[in-house]
Amino acid sequence: MLVLGVESSCDETGVALYDSAQGLLADALYSQIAMHNEYGGVVPELASRDHIRRLLPLTRQVFEESERTLADLDGIAFTQGPGLAGALLVGAGMARALAFALNIPAVGVHHLEGHMLSPLISDTPPEFPFVALLVSGGHTQLMLVSGVGRYTLLGETMDDAAGEAFDKTAQLLGLGYPGGPALSKLAATGDATRFTLPRPMLNSGDFDFSFSGLKTAVLTLVRKEGLDHAADIAAAFQTAAVDVLVRKSLAACKKSGATRLVVAGGVGANTHLRAQLTGEGLRRGITVFYPRMEFCTDNGAMIAYAGAQRLAACLSGTPPQPDLSFAIKPRWELASLEAV
Ligand code: KG4
Ligand code: ZN
Protein backbone atom coordinates (compact mmCIF):
# COMPACT_ATOMS: atom_id res chain seq x y z
CA MET A 1 0.00 0.00 0.00
CA LEU A 2 1.44 3.37 -1.07
CA VAL A 3 0.62 6.32 1.20
CA LEU A 4 1.40 10.01 0.76
CA GLY A 5 2.07 11.76 4.09
CA VAL A 6 1.56 15.51 4.56
CA GLU A 7 2.75 17.44 7.64
CA SER A 8 1.94 21.15 8.06
CA SER A 9 1.14 21.62 11.75
CA CYS A 10 3.76 24.23 12.60
CA ASP A 11 6.85 25.62 10.89
CA GLU A 12 7.91 22.73 8.70
CA THR A 13 6.28 21.50 5.50
CA GLY A 14 6.93 17.77 5.20
CA VAL A 15 5.84 15.38 2.46
CA ALA A 16 6.75 11.69 2.13
CA LEU A 17 5.83 8.49 0.29
CA TYR A 18 5.69 5.32 2.39
CA ASP A 19 5.10 1.89 0.96
CA SER A 20 3.98 -0.75 3.47
CA ALA A 21 5.97 -3.44 1.63
CA GLN A 22 9.06 -1.48 0.61
CA GLY A 23 9.32 1.09 3.41
CA LEU A 24 10.04 4.77 3.03
CA LEU A 25 10.49 5.70 -0.65
CA ALA A 26 11.00 9.47 -0.49
CA ASP A 27 10.87 12.27 2.04
CA ALA A 28 11.01 16.02 1.37
CA LEU A 29 11.07 18.85 3.88
CA TYR A 30 11.05 22.61 3.85
CA SER A 31 11.84 24.35 7.14
CA GLN A 32 10.54 27.88 7.74
CA ILE A 33 12.99 28.43 10.62
CA ALA A 34 14.95 31.18 8.82
CA MET A 35 11.72 33.07 8.10
CA HIS A 36 10.53 32.97 11.74
CA ASN A 37 13.97 33.52 13.26
CA GLU A 38 13.84 37.31 13.03
CA TYR A 39 10.61 37.32 15.10
CA GLY A 40 12.02 35.04 17.82
CA GLY A 41 9.27 32.45 17.31
CA VAL A 42 6.68 31.10 14.87
CA VAL A 43 4.32 33.68 13.31
CA PRO A 44 1.19 31.60 12.56
CA GLU A 45 -0.09 33.61 9.58
CA LEU A 46 3.31 33.57 7.87
CA ALA A 47 3.54 29.82 8.54
CA SER A 48 0.18 29.10 6.82
CA ARG A 49 1.07 31.14 3.76
CA ASP A 50 4.42 29.45 3.40
CA HIS A 51 2.87 25.96 3.63
CA ILE A 52 0.71 26.94 0.63
CA ARG A 53 3.83 27.87 -1.33
CA ARG A 54 5.78 24.70 -0.47
CA LEU A 55 3.29 21.85 -0.42
CA LEU A 56 2.80 21.13 -4.13
CA PRO A 57 6.48 21.48 -5.18
CA LEU A 58 7.46 19.10 -2.34
CA THR A 59 4.73 16.66 -3.39
CA ARG A 60 5.98 16.68 -7.00
CA GLN A 61 9.51 16.12 -5.65
CA VAL A 62 8.67 12.92 -3.73
CA PHE A 63 6.87 11.42 -6.73
CA GLU A 64 9.80 12.23 -9.02
CA GLU A 65 12.38 10.87 -6.58
CA SER A 66 10.52 7.60 -6.10
CA GLU A 67 9.48 7.30 -9.76
CA ARG A 68 5.83 6.87 -8.79
CA THR A 69 2.73 8.68 -10.02
CA LEU A 70 -0.49 9.84 -8.39
CA ALA A 71 -2.21 6.80 -9.93
CA ASP A 72 -0.04 4.52 -7.74
CA LEU A 73 -1.39 6.02 -4.48
CA ASP A 74 -3.65 3.96 -2.20
CA GLY A 75 -4.26 6.64 0.42
CA ILE A 76 -3.25 10.01 1.82
CA ALA A 77 -2.39 10.82 5.45
CA PHE A 78 -2.32 14.36 6.78
CA THR A 79 -1.67 15.91 10.19
CA GLN A 80 -5.11 16.76 11.58
CA GLY A 81 -3.85 18.19 14.87
CA PRO A 82 -2.70 19.36 17.30
CA GLY A 83 -1.05 22.45 15.85
CA LEU A 84 -1.67 25.89 14.40
CA ALA A 85 -5.20 26.01 12.94
CA GLY A 86 -4.32 27.88 9.73
CA ALA A 87 -1.25 25.75 9.09
CA LEU A 88 -3.20 22.52 9.64
CA LEU A 89 -5.93 23.65 7.23
CA VAL A 90 -3.43 23.96 4.39
CA GLY A 91 -2.35 20.31 4.63
CA ALA A 92 -5.86 19.05 5.36
CA GLY A 93 -7.36 20.93 2.40
CA MET A 94 -4.72 19.68 -0.01
CA ALA A 95 -4.90 16.07 1.22
CA ARG A 96 -8.71 15.84 1.17
CA ALA A 97 -8.96 17.47 -2.27
CA LEU A 98 -6.35 15.17 -3.78
CA ALA A 99 -7.92 12.09 -2.20
CA PHE A 100 -11.36 13.11 -3.54
CA ALA A 101 -9.96 13.66 -7.04
CA LEU A 102 -8.21 10.26 -6.99
CA ASN A 103 -11.14 8.51 -5.26
CA ILE A 104 -8.91 7.11 -2.52
CA PRO A 105 -9.21 7.40 1.28
CA ALA A 106 -7.60 10.20 3.29
CA VAL A 107 -6.88 9.81 7.00
CA GLY A 108 -6.23 12.53 9.59
CA VAL A 109 -3.23 11.65 11.77
CA HIS A 110 -2.46 12.88 15.30
CA HIS A 111 0.85 14.75 15.10
CA LEU A 112 2.17 13.18 18.31
CA GLU A 113 1.17 9.69 17.18
CA GLY A 114 3.35 10.42 14.15
CA HIS A 115 6.26 11.38 16.40
CA MET A 116 5.71 8.43 18.73
CA LEU A 117 5.66 5.84 15.94
CA SER A 118 8.59 7.41 14.04
CA PRO A 119 11.20 5.08 15.64
CA LEU A 120 9.27 2.22 13.98
CA ILE A 121 10.40 3.45 10.53
CA SER A 122 13.39 1.18 10.85
CA ASP A 123 14.72 -2.22 9.80
CA THR A 124 14.82 -3.18 13.49
CA PRO A 125 11.71 -1.54 15.00
CA PRO A 126 10.84 -1.97 18.70
CA GLU A 127 8.08 -4.44 19.49
CA PHE A 128 5.03 -3.42 21.53
CA PRO A 129 4.59 -2.75 24.39
CA PHE A 130 6.99 0.09 25.12
CA VAL A 131 7.15 3.29 27.11
CA ALA A 132 7.39 6.42 24.93
CA LEU A 133 9.02 9.65 26.02
CA LEU A 134 7.57 12.38 23.82
CA VAL A 135 9.65 15.51 24.01
CA SER A 136 8.73 18.14 21.45
CA GLY A 137 8.43 21.90 21.32
CA GLY A 138 4.83 21.79 22.54
CA HIS A 139 4.53 18.55 24.54
CA THR A 140 6.31 16.48 27.15
CA GLN A 141 4.59 13.20 27.92
CA LEU A 142 5.34 9.68 29.06
CA MET A 143 3.02 7.13 27.45
CA LEU A 144 2.57 3.39 27.77
CA VAL A 145 2.11 2.14 24.20
CA SER A 146 0.68 -1.35 23.74
CA GLY A 147 -0.23 -1.03 20.04
CA VAL A 148 -1.16 1.54 17.41
CA GLY A 149 -3.78 3.73 19.08
CA ARG A 150 -3.43 1.95 22.45
CA TYR A 151 -1.93 4.72 24.52
CA THR A 152 -2.08 5.25 28.28
CA LEU A 153 -0.82 8.57 29.59
CA LEU A 154 1.61 8.00 32.49
CA GLY A 155 2.63 11.60 33.06
CA GLU A 156 3.12 14.97 31.40
CA THR A 157 4.42 18.45 32.00
CA MET A 158 2.49 20.74 34.29
CA ASP A 159 3.74 23.87 32.50
CA ASP A 160 6.41 24.31 29.81
CA ALA A 161 7.33 21.53 27.40
CA ALA A 162 10.95 20.32 27.37
CA GLY A 163 11.58 21.84 23.92
CA GLU A 164 9.98 25.09 25.04
CA ALA A 165 12.35 25.17 28.05
CA PHE A 166 15.33 24.69 25.70
CA ASP A 167 13.98 27.45 23.42
CA LYS A 168 13.30 29.93 26.25
CA THR A 169 16.64 29.24 27.93
CA ALA A 170 18.40 29.70 24.60
CA GLN A 171 16.66 33.04 24.23
CA LEU A 172 17.89 34.10 27.70
CA LEU A 173 21.40 33.19 26.57
CA GLY A 174 21.08 35.27 23.40
CA LEU A 175 20.81 32.32 21.00
CA GLY A 176 18.36 32.25 18.07
CA TYR A 177 15.12 30.35 17.42
CA PRO A 178 14.62 27.42 17.77
CA GLY A 179 17.11 27.35 20.58
CA GLY A 180 17.43 23.61 21.28
CA PRO A 181 20.14 22.76 18.76
CA ALA A 182 22.11 26.00 19.43
CA LEU A 183 21.89 25.54 23.19
CA SER A 184 23.08 21.95 23.05
CA LYS A 185 26.02 22.99 20.82
CA LEU A 186 27.01 25.71 23.30
CA ALA A 187 26.55 23.33 26.25
CA ALA A 188 29.07 20.92 24.73
CA THR A 189 31.77 23.59 25.22
CA GLY A 190 30.75 24.42 28.80
CA ASP A 191 31.50 23.13 32.29
CA ALA A 192 28.30 21.56 33.64
CA THR A 193 29.63 21.62 37.23
CA ARG A 194 30.26 25.38 37.59
CA PHE A 195 26.59 26.04 38.40
CA THR A 196 23.92 23.77 39.84
CA LEU A 197 20.34 24.27 38.71
CA PRO A 198 17.20 22.72 40.25
CA ARG A 199 15.67 19.47 38.99
CA PRO A 200 11.96 20.26 39.38
CA MET A 201 9.64 17.43 40.45
CA LEU A 202 12.47 14.90 40.38
CA ASN A 203 11.21 13.30 43.58
CA SER A 204 7.48 13.94 43.10
CA GLY A 205 6.83 10.18 43.01
CA ASP A 206 4.85 10.43 39.77
CA PHE A 207 5.71 10.79 36.09
CA ASP A 208 4.83 14.46 35.71
CA PHE A 209 7.29 17.20 34.82
CA SER A 210 7.71 20.92 35.38
CA PHE A 211 10.19 23.06 33.47
CA SER A 212 9.13 26.64 34.09
CA GLY A 213 10.99 26.87 37.44
CA LEU A 214 14.18 25.69 35.76
CA LYS A 215 13.85 28.44 33.18
CA THR A 216 13.31 31.01 35.96
CA ALA A 217 16.42 29.70 37.75
CA VAL A 218 18.39 30.30 34.54
CA LEU A 219 16.99 33.85 34.34
CA THR A 220 18.12 34.53 37.92
CA LEU A 221 21.56 33.10 37.17
CA VAL A 222 21.94 35.16 33.98
CA ARG A 223 20.99 38.33 35.89
CA LYS A 224 23.64 37.55 38.51
CA GLU A 225 26.45 36.29 36.30
CA GLY A 226 25.80 38.02 32.99
CA LEU A 227 26.64 36.10 29.83
CA ASP A 228 30.37 35.62 30.52
CA HIS A 229 29.68 32.01 31.51
CA ALA A 230 26.90 31.37 28.97
CA ALA A 231 28.36 28.00 27.92
CA ASP A 232 28.53 26.82 31.57
CA ILE A 233 24.95 27.97 32.17
CA ALA A 234 23.83 26.15 29.01
CA ALA A 235 25.59 22.99 30.20
CA ALA A 236 24.05 23.25 33.70
CA PHE A 237 20.57 23.72 32.19
CA GLN A 238 20.94 20.81 29.77
CA THR A 239 22.27 18.52 32.51
CA ALA A 240 19.37 19.38 34.83
CA ALA A 241 16.66 19.00 32.15
CA VAL A 242 18.11 15.75 30.82
CA ASP A 243 18.56 14.35 34.33
CA VAL A 244 14.85 14.73 35.06
CA LEU A 245 13.82 13.29 31.67
CA VAL A 246 16.11 10.27 32.07
CA ARG A 247 15.18 9.44 35.67
CA LYS A 248 11.43 9.76 35.12
CA SER A 249 11.51 7.77 31.88
CA LEU A 250 13.41 4.88 33.47
CA ALA A 251 11.14 4.97 36.52
CA ALA A 252 8.13 4.74 34.17
CA CYS A 253 9.67 1.68 32.51
CA LYS A 254 10.25 0.07 35.89
CA LYS A 255 6.70 0.78 37.10
CA SER A 256 5.08 -0.57 33.93
CA GLY A 257 7.48 -3.49 33.51
CA ALA A 258 8.52 -2.32 30.04
CA THR A 259 11.98 -3.27 28.78
CA ARG A 260 11.79 -0.97 25.76
CA LEU A 261 11.81 2.81 25.77
CA VAL A 262 11.11 4.88 22.68
CA VAL A 263 12.12 8.53 22.47
CA ALA A 264 10.43 10.86 19.99
CA GLY A 265 10.06 14.55 19.21
CA GLY A 266 12.53 17.36 18.58
CA VAL A 267 14.39 17.10 21.91
CA GLY A 268 15.04 13.44 21.05
CA ALA A 269 17.76 14.82 18.74
CA ASN A 270 19.71 16.01 21.79
CA THR A 271 22.94 14.04 21.93
CA HIS A 272 23.38 14.41 25.71
CA LEU A 273 19.86 13.03 26.28
CA ARG A 274 20.59 10.13 23.92
CA ALA A 275 23.91 9.27 25.58
CA GLN A 276 22.47 9.42 29.12
CA LEU A 277 19.33 7.43 28.31
CA THR A 278 21.15 4.71 26.40
CA GLY A 279 23.80 4.34 29.12
CA GLU A 280 21.41 4.37 32.10
CA GLY A 281 18.95 2.14 30.19
CA LEU A 282 21.63 -0.43 29.47
CA ARG A 283 22.44 -0.64 33.17
CA ARG A 284 18.79 -1.49 33.90
CA GLY A 285 18.19 -3.90 31.02
CA ILE A 286 16.16 -1.36 29.05
CA THR A 287 16.77 -0.91 25.32
CA VAL A 288 16.23 2.62 24.06
CA PHE A 289 15.03 3.31 20.52
CA TYR A 290 15.28 6.63 18.67
CA PRO A 291 14.01 7.86 15.35
CA ARG A 292 16.56 8.70 12.69
CA MET A 293 18.04 12.12 13.56
CA GLU A 294 16.12 13.89 10.77
CA PHE A 295 12.83 12.33 11.91
CA CYS A 296 13.09 13.73 15.47
CA THR A 297 11.74 17.10 14.35
CA ASP A 298 8.63 17.50 12.20
CA ASN A 299 8.56 15.56 8.94
CA GLY A 300 6.19 13.95 6.44
CA ALA A 301 7.60 10.43 6.86
CA MET A 302 6.16 9.95 10.36
CA ILE A 303 2.71 11.05 9.15
CA ALA A 304 2.85 8.74 6.12
CA TYR A 305 3.91 5.85 8.39
CA ALA A 306 1.24 6.41 11.08
CA GLY A 307 -1.37 6.97 8.35
CA ALA A 308 -0.38 3.72 6.63
CA GLN A 309 -0.99 1.79 9.89
CA ARG A 310 -4.45 3.32 10.27
CA LEU A 311 -5.38 2.98 6.57
CA ALA A 312 -4.30 -0.67 6.55
CA ALA A 313 -6.62 -1.36 9.47
CA CYS A 314 -9.50 0.48 7.71
CA LEU A 315 -8.95 -1.22 4.39
CA SER A 316 -8.83 -4.71 5.88
CA GLY A 317 -12.07 -4.09 7.78
CA THR A 318 -15.11 -2.14 6.66
CA PRO A 319 -14.25 0.38 3.95
CA PRO A 320 -14.09 3.90 5.38
CA GLN A 321 -17.00 6.22 4.60
CA PRO A 322 -16.01 8.85 2.04
CA ASP A 323 -15.20 11.86 4.14
CA LEU A 324 -15.09 15.24 2.42
CA SER A 325 -14.78 17.38 5.52
CA PHE A 326 -11.34 18.67 6.30
CA ALA A 327 -12.02 19.44 9.94
CA ILE A 328 -8.83 20.00 11.89
CA LYS A 329 -8.18 19.62 15.62
CA PRO A 330 -5.78 22.31 16.90
CA ARG A 331 -6.20 20.73 20.37
CA TRP A 332 -6.37 16.94 20.56
CA GLU A 333 -5.49 14.50 23.38
CA LEU A 334 -3.24 11.67 22.24
CA ALA A 335 -4.63 9.26 24.83
CA SER A 336 -8.13 9.74 23.33
CA LEU A 337 -7.23 7.97 20.06
CA GLU A 338 -8.94 4.73 19.10
CA ALA A 339 -6.95 1.54 18.63
CA VAL A 340 -6.70 0.22 15.07
O1 KG4 B 1 8.94 17.91 17.55
P1 KG4 B 1 9.29 19.25 17.11
O2 KG4 B 1 9.84 19.45 15.73
O3 KG4 B 1 8.11 20.26 17.23
C1 KG4 B 1 6.90 20.06 17.85
O4 KG4 B 1 6.14 19.18 17.40
O5 KG4 B 1 6.68 20.79 18.84
O6 KG4 B 1 10.36 19.79 18.17
C2 KG4 B 1 10.92 21.06 18.11
C3 KG4 B 1 11.60 21.30 19.43
C4 KG4 B 1 12.10 22.72 19.59
O7 KG4 B 1 11.71 23.19 20.86
C5 KG4 B 1 13.62 22.57 19.49
O8 KG4 B 1 14.33 23.56 20.23
C6 KG4 B 1 13.83 21.20 20.08
O9 KG4 B 1 12.75 20.45 19.57
N1 KG4 B 1 15.11 20.60 19.65
C7 KG4 B 1 16.12 20.32 20.49
C8 KG4 B 1 17.18 19.80 19.69
N2 KG4 B 1 16.76 19.80 18.40
C9 KG4 B 1 15.49 20.29 18.39
N3 KG4 B 1 16.22 20.46 21.83
C10 KG4 B 1 17.38 20.07 22.39
N4 KG4 B 1 18.43 19.59 21.71
C11 KG4 B 1 18.39 19.43 20.37
N5 KG4 B 1 19.44 18.94 19.71
ZN1 ZN C 1 6.35 17.91 16.18
Image (cartoon, grey):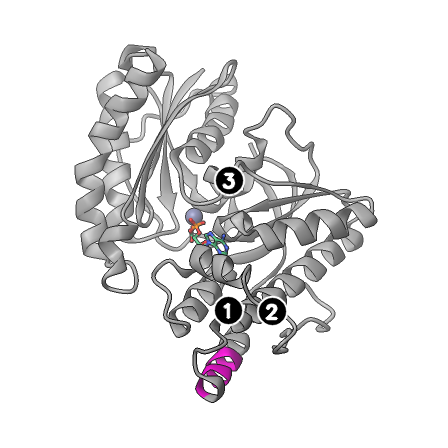
Q: Residue at x 62, y 61 (%)?
A: 242
SS under mark 1: helix
- Work out how far the residue at label 3 is from the one at label 1, CA to CA, in angstroms: 24 Å
Instruction: Decide: is 58 above or below 69.
Output: below
The main secondary structure of the magenta stretch is helix
Q: Earlier in the sequence, mark 3 or mark 1?
A: 1
From the viewer's side, name the closer residue of 85 and 116.
116
Q: Residue at x 55, y 49 (%)?
A: 268
Label 3 neighbourhood size at 10 Å, few (<14), some (14-19), many (20+)? few
From the viewer's side, name the closer residue of 242 and 4.
242
SS under mark 3: helix
Considering the image in quadrants, where does the C terminus appear? top right
Tell me whether circle 3 and circle 1 mark residues in contact (CB < 8 Å): no
Mark 2 — residue? 191
| Position of residue 83 in the picture relative to residue 137 (left or right) | left
SS under mark 2: loop
* Residue 4 placement: quadrant: top left
